[in-house]
Image (spheres, rainbow, N blue to C red):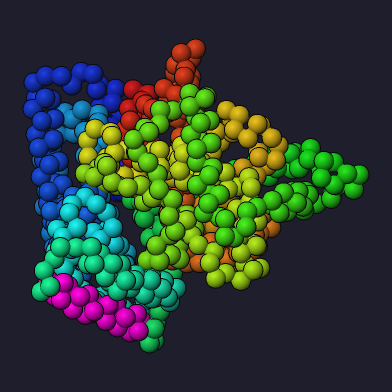
Amino acid sequence: MQKQLFNILALSALVAACNNAGQHTAGADTTQNAAFRRYEEHFIADLWKVYPGWATSEGYHKYDSVLPIPDAAGLQAELDFVQRHQDSLATYDTTKLGASLLIDYYQVQNKLASIKWEIQEAKTQEWNPSNYNVSATFAFILNEHYAPLDTRLRSFCSRLAGVPAYYEAARQQIKDPVPELTALAQEQNLGGLSIFEKDLADSLAQSGLSPEEKKQLLARARTAAAAIRGYAAWLKALRPEHPRSFRLGKELYAAKFNYDIQSAYTAAQIYDSAVARKAWVHGEMVRISKQLWPKYFGNAPIPADSLLLVKKVIDTLSVQHVKPAEFQQAIEQQLPALTAFIKEKDLLYLDPSKPLKVRKEPAYMAGVAGASISAPGPYDKDGNTYYNVGSLEGWPADRAESYLREYNHYILQILNIHEAIPGHYTQLVYANQSPGIIKSILGNGAMVEGWAVYTEQMMLENGYGDNAPEMWLMWYKWNLRTVCNTILDYRVHVLGMDKEAAIRLLTQEAFQQQAEAEGKWKRISVSSVQLTSYYTGYKEIIELRRAWQEKTGDRFQLKQFHEKFLSYGKAPVKYIRRLMLQ
Protein backbone atom coordinates (compact mmCIF):
# COMPACT_ATOMS: atom_id res chain seq x y z
CA MET A 1 0.00 0.00 0.00
CA GLN A 2 2.83 2.37 0.91
CA LYS A 3 4.60 1.69 -2.40
CA GLN A 4 1.33 2.11 -4.32
CA LEU A 5 0.75 5.48 -2.63
CA PHE A 6 4.26 6.55 -3.53
CA ASN A 7 3.72 5.61 -7.18
CA ILE A 8 0.49 7.63 -7.30
CA LEU A 9 2.19 10.67 -5.79
CA ALA A 10 5.20 10.29 -8.09
CA LEU A 11 3.04 10.10 -11.20
CA SER A 12 0.96 13.05 -10.02
CA ALA A 13 4.10 15.11 -9.61
CA LEU A 14 5.24 14.07 -13.08
CA VAL A 15 1.92 15.06 -14.65
CA ALA A 16 2.11 18.43 -12.94
CA ALA A 17 5.68 18.93 -14.13
CA CYS A 18 4.81 17.98 -17.68
CA ASN A 19 1.81 20.28 -17.72
CA ASN A 20 3.98 23.16 -16.58
CA ALA A 21 7.13 22.25 -18.50
CA GLY A 22 7.04 25.43 -20.55
CA GLN A 23 6.87 27.55 -17.42
CA HIS A 24 10.17 26.25 -16.01
CA THR A 25 12.30 29.04 -17.41
CA ALA A 26 13.65 31.25 -14.66
CA GLY A 27 14.55 31.79 -11.02
CA ALA A 28 14.66 28.82 -8.68
CA ASP A 29 13.62 26.40 -11.41
CA THR A 30 16.63 27.23 -13.57
CA THR A 31 18.91 26.88 -10.56
CA GLN A 32 17.36 23.57 -9.56
CA ASN A 33 17.65 22.18 -13.10
CA ALA A 34 21.29 23.20 -13.40
CA ALA A 35 22.05 21.67 -10.00
CA PHE A 36 20.37 18.41 -10.96
CA ARG A 37 22.32 18.20 -14.21
CA ARG A 38 25.53 18.53 -12.19
CA TYR A 39 24.25 15.84 -9.84
CA GLU A 40 23.61 13.52 -12.79
CA GLU A 41 27.27 13.82 -13.80
CA HIS A 42 28.29 12.94 -10.24
CA PHE A 43 25.87 10.00 -10.14
CA ILE A 44 27.17 8.54 -13.39
CA ALA A 45 30.80 8.95 -12.35
CA ASP A 46 30.05 7.13 -9.10
CA LEU A 47 27.98 4.48 -10.89
CA TRP A 48 30.88 3.47 -13.12
CA LYS A 49 33.23 3.09 -10.17
CA VAL A 50 30.85 0.58 -8.59
CA TYR A 51 29.90 -1.16 -11.86
CA PRO A 52 32.97 -1.00 -14.15
CA GLY A 53 31.80 -3.89 -16.37
CA TRP A 54 28.58 -2.02 -17.08
CA ALA A 55 30.66 1.07 -17.87
CA THR A 56 32.68 -0.90 -20.42
CA SER A 57 29.55 -2.15 -22.16
CA GLU A 58 28.27 1.45 -22.42
CA GLY A 59 31.50 2.61 -24.04
CA TYR A 60 33.11 4.23 -20.97
CA HIS A 61 36.57 2.68 -20.63
CA LYS A 62 38.24 4.33 -17.65
CA TYR A 63 37.71 1.23 -15.52
CA ASP A 64 38.22 -1.55 -18.08
CA SER A 65 41.01 -3.01 -15.96
CA VAL A 66 38.87 -3.33 -12.81
CA LEU A 67 37.00 -6.50 -11.87
CA PRO A 68 34.88 -6.06 -8.70
CA ILE A 69 34.83 -9.07 -6.39
CA PRO A 70 31.27 -10.14 -5.48
CA ASP A 71 32.01 -10.84 -1.80
CA ALA A 72 30.35 -9.32 1.27
CA ALA A 73 32.44 -6.17 0.94
CA GLY A 74 31.41 -5.85 -2.71
CA LEU A 75 27.71 -6.11 -1.84
CA GLN A 76 28.14 -3.54 0.92
CA ALA A 77 29.81 -1.18 -1.55
CA GLU A 78 26.69 -1.42 -3.72
CA LEU A 79 24.40 -0.72 -0.77
CA ASP A 80 26.56 2.23 0.31
CA PHE A 81 26.32 3.59 -3.24
CA VAL A 82 22.53 3.29 -3.08
CA GLN A 83 22.30 5.06 0.26
CA ARG A 84 24.54 7.94 -0.83
CA HIS A 85 22.43 8.67 -3.85
CA GLN A 86 19.08 8.17 -2.18
CA ASP A 87 20.23 10.82 0.30
CA SER A 88 21.26 13.10 -2.58
CA LEU A 89 17.94 12.70 -4.40
CA ALA A 90 16.07 13.65 -1.23
CA THR A 91 17.59 17.16 -1.42
CA TYR A 92 15.85 18.04 -4.72
CA ASP A 93 12.42 19.62 -5.03
CA THR A 94 10.80 17.63 -7.85
CA THR A 95 8.19 20.34 -8.42
CA LYS A 96 10.98 22.61 -9.65
CA LEU A 97 12.52 20.18 -12.14
CA GLY A 98 11.74 20.35 -15.85
CA ALA A 99 9.77 17.44 -17.24
CA SER A 100 12.70 15.70 -18.94
CA LEU A 101 14.90 15.99 -15.86
CA LEU A 102 12.04 14.70 -13.72
CA ILE A 103 12.05 11.51 -15.80
CA ASP A 104 15.79 11.23 -15.11
CA TYR A 105 15.07 11.72 -11.40
CA TYR A 106 12.57 8.86 -11.36
CA GLN A 107 14.84 6.65 -13.42
CA VAL A 108 17.70 7.11 -10.95
CA GLN A 109 15.33 6.65 -8.02
CA ASN A 110 13.95 3.44 -9.51
CA LYS A 111 17.41 2.03 -10.23
CA LEU A 112 18.64 2.67 -6.70
CA ALA A 113 15.57 1.07 -5.16
CA SER A 114 15.91 -1.87 -7.55
CA ILE A 115 19.54 -2.53 -6.59
CA LYS A 116 18.67 -2.47 -2.89
CA TRP A 117 15.66 -4.76 -3.42
CA GLU A 118 17.72 -7.18 -5.49
CA ILE A 119 20.34 -7.57 -2.75
CA GLN A 120 18.22 -7.43 0.39
CA GLU A 121 14.83 -8.82 -0.67
CA ALA A 122 15.21 -10.95 -3.79
CA LYS A 123 18.75 -12.08 -2.79
CA THR A 124 19.52 -13.38 -6.27
CA GLN A 125 23.23 -13.37 -5.41
CA GLU A 126 22.49 -16.45 -3.29
CA TRP A 127 20.37 -18.58 -5.62
CA ASN A 128 21.30 -17.55 -9.17
CA PRO A 129 24.78 -18.90 -10.08
CA SER A 130 24.45 -17.48 -13.62
CA ASN A 131 24.86 -13.99 -12.11
CA TYR A 132 28.55 -14.84 -11.92
CA ASN A 133 30.20 -14.76 -15.33
CA VAL A 134 33.17 -12.64 -16.40
CA SER A 135 33.17 -13.56 -20.10
CA ALA A 136 31.07 -10.77 -21.63
CA THR A 137 33.24 -7.85 -20.53
CA PHE A 138 36.46 -9.61 -21.51
CA ALA A 139 34.96 -10.35 -24.93
CA PHE A 140 33.98 -6.70 -25.35
CA ILE A 141 37.49 -5.47 -24.50
CA LEU A 142 39.03 -7.95 -26.90
CA ASN A 143 36.69 -7.58 -29.87
CA GLU A 144 35.74 -3.90 -29.99
CA HIS A 145 38.07 -1.33 -31.54
CA TYR A 146 37.56 1.68 -29.26
CA ALA A 147 41.31 1.85 -28.47
CA PRO A 148 44.57 0.42 -29.87
CA LEU A 149 44.85 -3.35 -29.43
CA ASP A 150 47.82 -3.13 -27.08
CA THR A 151 45.96 -0.72 -24.79
CA ARG A 152 42.97 -3.04 -24.66
CA LEU A 153 45.16 -6.08 -24.02
CA ARG A 154 46.83 -4.38 -21.05
CA SER A 155 43.41 -3.66 -19.55
CA PHE A 156 42.47 -7.26 -20.27
CA CYS A 157 45.58 -8.45 -18.42
CA SER A 158 44.96 -6.29 -15.34
CA ARG A 159 41.33 -7.42 -15.15
CA LEU A 160 42.36 -11.07 -15.41
CA ALA A 161 44.21 -10.86 -12.11
CA GLY A 162 40.93 -10.76 -10.19
CA VAL A 163 39.21 -13.75 -11.84
CA PRO A 164 40.22 -16.45 -9.29
CA ALA A 165 39.05 -14.29 -6.36
CA TYR A 166 35.85 -13.47 -8.28
CA TYR A 167 34.83 -17.11 -8.60
CA GLU A 168 35.89 -17.94 -5.06
CA ALA A 169 33.61 -15.15 -3.82
CA ALA A 170 30.81 -16.52 -5.99
CA ARG A 171 31.11 -19.91 -4.30
CA GLN A 172 30.87 -18.27 -0.89
CA GLN A 173 27.71 -16.33 -1.84
CA ILE A 174 25.73 -19.22 -3.32
CA LYS A 175 23.21 -20.94 -1.04
CA ASP A 176 20.59 -23.48 -2.18
CA PRO A 177 20.72 -22.39 -5.84
CA VAL A 178 18.02 -22.97 -8.43
CA PRO A 179 18.94 -26.14 -10.40
CA GLU A 180 17.97 -24.64 -13.78
CA LEU A 181 20.09 -21.55 -13.13
CA THR A 182 22.94 -23.75 -11.94
CA ALA A 183 22.90 -25.58 -15.27
CA LEU A 184 22.73 -22.28 -17.18
CA ALA A 185 25.74 -20.96 -15.26
CA GLN A 186 27.77 -24.01 -16.25
CA GLU A 187 26.76 -23.73 -19.91
CA GLN A 188 27.48 -20.02 -20.24
CA ASN A 189 30.72 -19.98 -18.27
CA LEU A 190 32.18 -22.92 -20.17
CA GLY A 191 30.96 -21.31 -23.39
CA GLY A 192 33.14 -18.30 -22.64
CA LEU A 193 36.38 -20.25 -22.34
CA SER A 194 37.25 -19.69 -26.00
CA ILE A 195 37.74 -15.98 -25.20
CA PHE A 196 40.66 -16.78 -22.90
CA GLU A 197 42.11 -19.66 -24.88
CA LYS A 198 41.56 -19.06 -28.60
CA ASP A 199 40.48 -15.44 -29.11
CA LEU A 200 43.16 -14.03 -26.83
CA ALA A 201 45.89 -16.01 -28.61
CA ASP A 202 44.70 -14.67 -31.96
CA SER A 203 44.81 -11.09 -30.67
CA LEU A 204 48.25 -11.53 -29.09
CA ALA A 205 49.62 -12.69 -32.44
CA GLN A 206 48.62 -9.29 -33.90
CA SER A 207 49.78 -7.19 -30.96
CA GLY A 208 52.94 -5.23 -30.25
CA LEU A 209 53.25 -6.30 -26.63
CA SER A 210 56.67 -7.28 -25.34
CA PRO A 211 57.45 -10.98 -24.83
CA GLU A 212 57.26 -10.46 -21.05
CA GLU A 213 53.80 -8.88 -21.33
CA LYS A 214 52.56 -11.69 -23.55
CA LYS A 215 53.92 -14.29 -21.15
CA GLN A 216 52.18 -12.67 -18.18
CA LEU A 217 48.91 -12.32 -20.07
CA LEU A 218 48.88 -15.96 -21.17
CA ALA A 219 49.72 -17.14 -17.66
CA ARG A 220 46.87 -15.13 -16.17
CA ALA A 221 44.53 -16.35 -18.90
CA ARG A 222 45.36 -19.96 -18.04
CA THR A 223 44.70 -19.27 -14.37
CA ALA A 224 41.42 -17.54 -15.22
CA ALA A 225 40.30 -20.44 -17.45
CA ALA A 226 41.12 -22.86 -14.64
CA ALA A 227 39.02 -20.77 -12.23
CA ILE A 228 36.08 -20.83 -14.67
CA ARG A 229 36.36 -24.59 -15.15
CA GLY A 230 36.64 -25.03 -11.40
CA TYR A 231 33.49 -22.98 -10.82
CA ALA A 232 31.57 -24.98 -13.42
CA ALA A 233 32.79 -28.28 -11.94
CA TRP A 234 31.88 -27.11 -8.42
CA LEU A 235 28.38 -26.24 -9.60
CA LYS A 236 28.00 -29.60 -11.33
CA ALA A 237 28.94 -31.43 -8.15
CA LEU A 238 26.75 -29.24 -5.93
CA ARG A 239 23.91 -31.03 -4.17
CA PRO A 240 21.98 -28.36 -2.25
CA GLU A 241 19.84 -29.68 0.59
CA HIS A 242 16.95 -27.31 -0.15
CA PRO A 243 17.29 -26.04 -3.74
CA ARG A 244 15.19 -22.97 -4.43
CA SER A 245 12.44 -23.13 -7.02
CA PHE A 246 12.98 -20.92 -10.05
CA ARG A 247 9.46 -19.57 -9.52
CA LEU A 248 9.53 -16.12 -7.94
CA GLY A 249 6.14 -16.20 -6.24
CA LYS A 250 3.51 -13.46 -6.18
CA GLU A 251 5.21 -10.86 -3.95
CA LEU A 252 8.68 -10.96 -5.51
CA TYR A 253 7.16 -11.09 -8.98
CA ALA A 254 5.00 -8.00 -8.41
CA ALA A 255 7.96 -6.07 -7.01
CA LYS A 256 10.29 -7.08 -9.84
CA PHE A 257 7.65 -6.17 -12.42
CA ASN A 258 7.34 -2.68 -10.90
CA TYR A 259 11.10 -2.12 -10.91
CA ASP A 260 11.94 -3.70 -14.27
CA ILE A 261 8.90 -2.83 -16.40
CA GLN A 262 7.89 0.54 -14.90
CA SER A 263 4.46 0.35 -16.47
CA ALA A 264 1.39 2.41 -15.72
CA TYR A 265 -0.24 -0.98 -15.10
CA THR A 266 0.36 -3.67 -12.47
CA ALA A 267 1.58 -7.16 -13.32
CA ALA A 268 -1.88 -8.58 -12.66
CA GLN A 269 -3.54 -5.98 -14.91
CA ILE A 270 -1.13 -6.76 -17.76
CA TYR A 271 -1.81 -10.47 -17.31
CA ASP A 272 -5.58 -9.91 -17.54
CA SER A 273 -5.11 -7.73 -20.63
CA ALA A 274 -2.97 -10.41 -22.29
CA VAL A 275 -5.62 -13.06 -21.67
CA ALA A 276 -8.22 -10.84 -23.37
CA ARG A 277 -5.83 -10.08 -26.25
CA LYS A 278 -5.27 -13.81 -26.84
CA ALA A 279 -9.01 -14.35 -27.32
CA TRP A 280 -9.22 -11.46 -29.80
CA VAL A 281 -6.21 -12.64 -31.80
CA HIS A 282 -7.68 -16.14 -31.99
CA GLY A 283 -10.79 -14.63 -33.55
CA GLU A 284 -8.78 -12.83 -36.23
CA MET A 285 -6.75 -15.96 -36.98
CA VAL A 286 -9.91 -18.03 -37.42
CA ARG A 287 -11.32 -15.40 -39.81
CA ILE A 288 -8.17 -15.37 -41.98
CA SER A 289 -7.81 -19.17 -41.90
CA LYS A 290 -11.33 -19.61 -43.25
CA GLN A 291 -10.43 -17.17 -46.02
CA LEU A 292 -7.27 -19.14 -46.92
CA TRP A 293 -8.73 -22.65 -46.57
CA PRO A 294 -10.00 -23.05 -50.18
CA LYS A 295 -6.65 -21.83 -51.56
CA TYR A 296 -4.67 -24.55 -49.80
CA PHE A 297 -7.21 -27.31 -49.13
CA GLY A 298 -9.69 -26.98 -51.97
CA ASN A 299 -13.08 -28.49 -51.21
CA ALA A 300 -11.93 -30.37 -48.10
CA PRO A 301 -14.34 -29.77 -45.18
CA ILE A 302 -13.31 -27.03 -42.78
CA PRO A 303 -12.59 -28.44 -39.29
CA ALA A 304 -15.27 -27.67 -36.71
CA ASP A 305 -12.59 -27.05 -34.09
CA SER A 306 -11.50 -23.45 -34.79
CA LEU A 307 -8.01 -23.87 -33.25
CA LEU A 308 -7.47 -27.02 -35.33
CA LEU A 309 -8.47 -25.04 -38.43
CA VAL A 310 -5.88 -22.37 -37.67
CA LYS A 311 -3.21 -24.96 -36.88
CA LYS A 312 -3.72 -26.78 -40.17
CA VAL A 313 -3.35 -23.58 -42.20
CA ILE A 314 -0.29 -22.48 -40.22
CA ASP A 315 1.34 -25.91 -40.55
CA THR A 316 0.79 -25.80 -44.31
CA LEU A 317 2.41 -22.37 -44.60
CA SER A 318 5.27 -23.24 -42.25
CA VAL A 319 6.88 -25.76 -44.59
CA GLN A 320 8.18 -22.78 -46.56
CA HIS A 321 11.54 -22.10 -44.91
CA VAL A 322 15.27 -21.88 -45.59
CA LYS A 323 17.77 -24.70 -45.17
CA PRO A 324 19.63 -24.90 -41.84
CA ALA A 325 22.95 -23.82 -43.32
CA GLU A 326 21.33 -20.78 -44.98
CA PHE A 327 19.58 -19.36 -41.91
CA GLN A 328 22.05 -16.55 -41.17
CA GLN A 329 22.51 -15.76 -44.86
CA ALA A 330 18.74 -15.40 -45.32
CA ILE A 331 18.61 -12.88 -42.50
CA GLU A 332 21.42 -10.81 -44.03
CA GLN A 333 19.66 -10.76 -47.41
CA GLN A 334 16.36 -9.48 -46.00
CA LEU A 335 17.70 -6.38 -44.26
CA PRO A 336 18.17 -4.20 -47.39
CA ALA A 337 14.55 -4.86 -48.42
CA LEU A 338 13.29 -3.65 -45.03
CA THR A 339 15.37 -0.49 -45.34
CA ALA A 340 14.05 0.19 -48.83
CA PHE A 341 10.42 -0.26 -47.71
CA ILE A 342 10.79 2.22 -44.84
CA LYS A 343 12.33 4.81 -47.15
CA GLU A 344 9.64 4.28 -49.79
CA LYS A 345 6.81 4.73 -47.26
CA ASP A 346 8.63 7.53 -45.39
CA LEU A 347 8.00 5.89 -42.03
CA LEU A 348 11.17 6.85 -40.21
CA TYR A 349 14.62 8.31 -40.83
CA LEU A 350 17.32 5.63 -40.95
CA ASP A 351 20.92 6.68 -40.35
CA PRO A 352 23.05 5.10 -43.13
CA SER A 353 26.27 5.72 -41.17
CA LYS A 354 25.36 3.12 -38.52
CA PRO A 355 25.89 -0.31 -40.13
CA LEU A 356 24.43 -3.50 -38.67
CA LYS A 357 26.63 -6.61 -38.64
CA VAL A 358 25.02 -10.05 -38.60
CA ARG A 359 27.09 -12.63 -36.70
CA LYS A 360 26.85 -16.07 -35.14
CA GLU A 361 25.65 -15.78 -31.54
CA PRO A 362 28.67 -15.93 -29.17
CA ALA A 363 28.76 -19.04 -27.01
CA TYR A 364 28.74 -17.10 -23.74
CA MET A 365 25.32 -15.66 -24.70
CA ALA A 366 23.76 -19.01 -25.56
CA GLY A 367 20.83 -20.61 -23.81
CA VAL A 368 18.32 -17.75 -23.47
CA ALA A 369 17.31 -16.31 -26.87
CA GLY A 370 17.90 -17.40 -30.47
CA ALA A 371 18.31 -13.90 -31.90
CA SER A 372 19.31 -10.60 -30.31
CA ILE A 373 20.95 -7.22 -30.89
CA SER A 374 24.17 -6.08 -29.21
CA ALA A 375 24.51 -2.32 -29.59
CA PRO A 376 27.24 0.16 -28.58
CA GLY A 377 26.66 2.32 -25.56
CA PRO A 378 26.18 6.11 -25.53
CA TYR A 379 29.92 6.70 -25.04
CA ASP A 380 30.82 4.59 -28.04
CA LYS A 381 28.41 5.78 -30.71
CA ASP A 382 30.65 4.56 -33.53
CA GLY A 383 30.98 1.04 -32.11
CA ASN A 384 29.70 -2.03 -33.89
CA THR A 385 26.06 -3.08 -33.67
CA TYR A 386 25.63 -6.85 -33.95
CA TYR A 387 22.65 -8.96 -34.90
CA ASN A 388 23.38 -12.20 -33.00
CA VAL A 389 21.92 -15.26 -34.72
CA GLY A 390 21.79 -18.63 -33.00
CA SER A 391 23.50 -21.38 -34.98
CA LEU A 392 21.76 -24.62 -36.00
CA GLU A 393 25.09 -26.37 -36.47
CA GLY A 394 25.10 -29.85 -34.98
CA TRP A 395 21.35 -29.93 -34.38
CA PRO A 396 19.49 -33.21 -35.06
CA ALA A 397 17.53 -33.00 -38.30
CA ASP A 398 14.12 -33.19 -36.62
CA ARG A 399 14.95 -30.43 -34.14
CA ALA A 400 16.33 -28.17 -36.90
CA GLU A 401 13.22 -28.79 -39.03
CA SER A 402 10.94 -27.90 -36.12
CA TYR A 403 12.91 -24.71 -35.45
CA LEU A 404 12.88 -23.64 -39.10
CA ARG A 405 9.15 -24.25 -39.42
CA GLU A 406 8.75 -21.86 -36.54
CA TYR A 407 10.98 -19.30 -38.31
CA ASN A 408 9.45 -19.93 -41.71
CA HIS A 409 9.43 -17.65 -44.76
CA TYR A 410 6.90 -15.26 -43.19
CA ILE A 411 8.04 -15.31 -39.57
CA LEU A 412 11.68 -14.78 -40.51
CA GLN A 413 10.73 -11.44 -42.05
CA ILE A 414 8.83 -10.44 -38.92
CA LEU A 415 11.79 -11.52 -36.78
CA ASN A 416 14.04 -9.20 -38.79
CA ILE A 417 11.59 -6.32 -38.39
CA HIS A 418 11.58 -6.93 -34.63
CA GLU A 419 15.30 -7.41 -34.06
CA ALA A 420 16.70 -5.12 -36.72
CA ILE A 421 14.85 -2.69 -38.98
CA PRO A 422 12.94 -0.72 -37.79
CA GLY A 423 12.92 -2.59 -34.44
CA HIS A 424 15.71 -2.93 -31.91
CA TYR A 425 18.61 -1.86 -34.09
CA THR A 426 16.88 1.32 -35.30
CA GLN A 427 15.57 2.23 -31.85
CA LEU A 428 19.01 1.78 -30.27
CA VAL A 429 20.60 4.05 -32.86
CA TYR A 430 18.07 6.75 -31.94
CA ALA A 431 18.63 6.12 -28.21
CA ASN A 432 22.34 6.83 -28.57
CA GLN A 433 21.52 10.16 -30.25
CA SER A 434 19.00 11.33 -27.67
CA PRO A 435 20.08 14.09 -25.27
CA GLY A 436 20.77 13.13 -21.69
CA ILE A 437 22.69 9.99 -20.84
CA ILE A 438 20.50 8.84 -17.95
CA LYS A 439 17.65 7.74 -20.21
CA SER A 440 20.11 5.72 -22.24
CA ILE A 441 22.08 3.92 -19.53
CA LEU A 442 19.00 3.34 -17.35
CA GLY A 443 16.95 2.31 -20.36
CA ASN A 444 13.57 0.67 -19.95
CA GLY A 445 13.31 -2.82 -21.42
CA ALA A 446 9.55 -2.63 -21.93
CA MET A 447 9.94 0.47 -24.07
CA VAL A 448 12.69 -1.22 -26.11
CA GLU A 449 10.85 -4.51 -26.58
CA GLY A 450 7.49 -2.80 -26.98
CA TRP A 451 8.84 -0.68 -29.81
CA ALA A 452 10.11 -3.78 -31.62
CA VAL A 453 6.71 -5.49 -31.32
CA TYR A 454 4.89 -2.30 -32.35
CA THR A 455 6.99 -1.99 -35.53
CA GLU A 456 5.90 -5.44 -36.69
CA GLN A 457 2.26 -4.37 -36.74
CA MET A 458 3.11 -0.93 -38.09
CA MET A 459 5.02 -2.35 -41.07
CA LEU A 460 2.14 -4.63 -42.05
CA GLU A 461 -0.37 -1.81 -41.58
CA ASN A 462 1.61 0.17 -44.14
CA GLY A 463 1.60 -2.59 -46.74
CA TYR A 464 4.69 -4.67 -46.01
CA GLY A 465 4.08 -8.14 -47.41
CA ASP A 466 1.55 -6.77 -49.92
CA ASN A 467 -1.23 -7.13 -47.35
CA ALA A 468 -1.24 -10.88 -48.01
CA PRO A 469 -3.54 -12.80 -45.64
CA GLU A 470 -0.73 -15.33 -45.17
CA MET A 471 1.55 -12.62 -43.79
CA TRP A 472 -1.17 -11.27 -41.50
CA LEU A 473 -1.98 -14.77 -40.21
CA MET A 474 1.66 -15.40 -39.43
CA TRP A 475 2.02 -12.01 -37.75
CA TYR A 476 -0.95 -12.82 -35.53
CA LYS A 477 0.79 -16.08 -34.68
CA TRP A 478 3.94 -14.10 -33.87
CA ASN A 479 1.98 -11.52 -31.88
CA LEU A 480 0.34 -14.39 -30.03
CA ARG A 481 3.84 -15.37 -28.92
CA THR A 482 4.23 -11.92 -27.36
CA VAL A 483 0.86 -12.22 -25.66
CA CYS A 484 1.50 -15.76 -24.45
CA ASN A 485 4.95 -14.75 -23.16
CA THR A 486 3.11 -12.58 -20.65
CA ILE A 487 0.48 -15.18 -19.83
CA LEU A 488 3.07 -17.92 -19.45
CA ASP A 489 5.45 -15.87 -17.33
CA TYR A 490 2.72 -14.89 -14.88
CA ARG A 491 1.12 -18.32 -14.71
CA VAL A 492 4.46 -20.07 -14.15
CA HIS A 493 6.05 -17.68 -11.66
CA VAL A 494 2.91 -16.59 -9.79
CA LEU A 495 0.27 -19.27 -10.35
CA GLY A 496 2.58 -22.32 -10.42
CA MET A 497 1.88 -23.60 -13.94
CA ASP A 498 3.87 -26.79 -14.71
CA LYS A 499 5.84 -27.66 -17.83
CA GLU A 500 3.19 -29.93 -19.34
CA ALA A 501 0.54 -27.21 -19.16
CA ALA A 502 2.99 -24.61 -20.45
CA ILE A 503 3.93 -26.69 -23.50
CA ARG A 504 0.24 -27.32 -24.16
CA LEU A 505 -0.49 -23.57 -24.04
CA LEU A 506 2.35 -22.79 -26.44
CA THR A 507 1.78 -25.57 -28.95
CA GLN A 508 -2.03 -25.83 -28.96
CA GLU A 509 -3.13 -22.25 -28.24
CA ALA A 510 -0.13 -20.28 -29.55
CA PHE A 511 0.54 -22.69 -32.48
CA GLN A 512 4.28 -22.91 -31.75
CA GLN A 513 6.51 -25.75 -32.85
CA GLN A 514 7.63 -28.21 -30.18
CA ALA A 515 11.26 -27.02 -30.34
CA GLU A 516 10.18 -23.41 -29.83
CA ALA A 517 7.94 -24.36 -26.91
CA GLU A 518 10.69 -26.38 -25.25
CA GLY A 519 13.07 -23.47 -25.68
CA LYS A 520 10.55 -21.08 -24.14
CA TRP A 521 10.15 -23.33 -21.11
CA LYS A 522 13.91 -23.29 -20.64
CA ARG A 523 13.92 -19.53 -20.96
CA ILE A 524 11.13 -19.06 -18.44
CA SER A 525 12.93 -21.33 -15.99
CA VAL A 526 16.05 -19.11 -16.07
CA SER A 527 14.39 -15.68 -16.32
CA SER A 528 11.41 -13.84 -14.89
CA VAL A 529 9.34 -10.75 -15.73
CA GLN A 530 11.40 -9.93 -18.85
CA LEU A 531 9.00 -11.93 -21.01
CA THR A 532 6.20 -9.53 -20.04
CA SER A 533 8.10 -6.53 -21.41
CA TYR A 534 7.10 -7.25 -25.03
CA TYR A 535 3.36 -7.10 -24.59
CA THR A 536 3.40 -4.39 -21.92
CA GLY A 537 5.47 -1.99 -24.03
CA TYR A 538 3.50 -2.81 -27.18
CA LYS A 539 0.18 -2.17 -25.44
CA GLU A 540 1.32 1.18 -24.05
CA ILE A 541 2.81 2.35 -27.37
CA ILE A 542 -0.35 1.47 -29.31
CA GLU A 543 -2.39 3.36 -26.72
CA LEU A 544 -0.02 6.34 -26.96
CA ARG A 545 -0.24 6.41 -30.77
CA ARG A 546 -4.01 6.43 -30.55
CA ALA A 547 -3.92 9.31 -28.05
CA TRP A 548 -1.38 11.23 -30.15
CA GLN A 549 -3.56 10.80 -33.24
CA GLU A 550 -6.56 12.15 -31.35
CA LYS A 551 -4.52 15.12 -30.15
CA THR A 552 -3.06 16.03 -33.55
CA GLY A 553 -6.16 15.24 -35.64
CA ASP A 554 -5.70 16.14 -39.29
CA ARG A 555 -2.07 17.06 -38.59
CA PHE A 556 -1.17 13.48 -37.61
CA GLN A 557 1.91 12.12 -39.38
CA LEU A 558 3.18 8.65 -38.60
CA LYS A 559 6.83 9.55 -39.23
CA GLN A 560 6.57 12.50 -36.86
CA PHE A 561 5.06 10.29 -34.17
CA HIS A 562 7.84 7.71 -34.56
CA GLU A 563 10.69 10.18 -34.47
CA LYS A 564 9.25 12.15 -31.56
CA PHE A 565 8.66 8.97 -29.59
CA LEU A 566 12.19 7.71 -30.20
CA SER A 567 13.73 11.09 -29.35
CA TYR A 568 13.19 10.42 -25.63
CA GLY A 569 15.72 7.61 -25.58
CA LYS A 570 14.82 4.47 -23.65
CA ALA A 571 12.57 6.09 -21.04
CA PRO A 572 9.49 4.16 -19.82
CA VAL A 573 6.49 4.62 -22.11
CA LYS A 574 4.37 6.02 -19.28
CA TYR A 575 6.81 8.96 -18.96
CA ILE A 576 7.17 9.47 -22.73
CA ARG A 577 3.38 9.56 -22.94
CA ARG A 578 3.19 12.42 -20.46
CA LEU A 579 5.88 14.38 -22.27
CA MET A 580 4.25 13.94 -25.67
CA LEU A 581 0.72 14.67 -24.53
CA GLN A 582 1.53 17.57 -22.19
Magenta stretch, residue numbers: 213-235
Residue 491 is situated, as x and y percent measured from the top left of the image, at: 53, 59
Residue 21 is situated, as x and y percent measured from the top left of the image, at: 24, 22
* Left or right of residue 278: residue 283: right
Residue 133 is situated, as x and y percent measured from the top left of the image, at: 30, 69
Against 233, residue 310 (above or below) is: above
* Left or right of residue 61: residue 117: right
Q: Which of 218 and 254 is in front in this view?
A: 218
The answer, for residue 512, to whether it is visible in the render is: no
Residue 379 is situated, as x and y percent measured from the top left of the image, at: 21, 44
Q: In which quarter of the image is residue 17?
A: top left
Tally of marks: 0
Q: Nearer the viewer, residue 295 or 276?
A: 295
Against 547, residue 59 (above or below) is: below
Against 360, residue 379 (above or below) is: above
What residue is drawn where x is 11% and y is 24%?
30
Does the segment drawn in magenta span residue 312?
no
What residue is drawn where x is 82% and y is 41%?
295
- Magenta stretch prevailing secondary structure: helix
Q: In which quarter of the image is residue 505?
A: bottom right
Q: Which of 511 and 254 is in front in this view?
A: 511
* Left or right of residue 358: residue 400: right
The answer, for residue 98, to whether it is visible in the render is: yes
What residue is drawn where x is 44% and y is 73%?
180
What residue is drawn where x is 81% and y is 45%?
296
Against 557, residue 351 (above or below) is: below
Question: Quadrant where the C terminus lies?
Answer: top left
